[in-house]
Amino acid sequence: MSAPGLCESLGRLRRGSLSEVIAVLVWSLALIPYLFLLAMVLSVVFAVIGLFYMYGGFSGLRPRVGDAGLGRVGVILMVILFINFVGIILTGIAIYSVGSKFDNGSTEIGGMLTAIVVTAFIGFIRGARRGNG
């Protein structure tokens, strides 16, 4: 894999994580009664966009990061209603592996927090954040 492909894959993974954060934030607007329908539709749109970006990012990183395949499987499982928590855990493990491979402590922490399903929202923020540990 060439360097531009690597940078593009990391960018896709970052954009996907950011889209997932936006989806959760927009979903929280559904608590306002007159915004319920709009918030739900926008939340689903951002979530789907995020999943596509994350899948593409993990696909591009697969030759470089051994556990990127887990991320792809995790993204697919995140779509299935009753086992989506397993997908979130696998995605968190893959994000941790990406951080470990490229020696980025912030991404490792984001992966750990994502793998713990209760703190997944915080983990996606840490995973999307740029930093060098």
Image (cartoon, grey):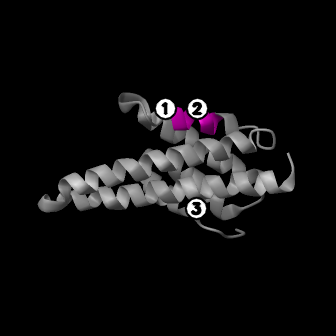
Q: CA distance from mark 1 to mark 3?
A: 20 Å
Q: CA distance from mark 2 to mark 3?
A: 19 Å
* Highlighted range, magenta: 70-76
The earlier-in-sequence mark between 1 and 3 is 1
Q: Identify the residue shown where x is 44% and y is 59%.
A: 21
Q: Which residue is mark 3?
A: 128
Q: Identify the residue shown where x is 76% and y is 38%.
A: 66
The kind of residue on which mark 1 rests is: Leu
Quarter of the image holding residue 15? bottom right
Asked whether residue 130 is drawn in magenta, I would say no
Q: Identify the residue shown where x is 73% and y is 43%.
A: 60
Left or right of residue 38, residue 127 in this image: right
Within 10 Å of disc 2 (Cα), the crowding (few <14, some 14-19, many 20+) is some
Q: Which residue is mark 1?
A: 77
Check disc 2 and report its element: helix, strand or loop.
helix
User: What's the mark number on residue 73?
Assistant: 2
Q: Is residue 29 above or below residue 56?
A: below
Residue 89 showing in the rendered view: yes
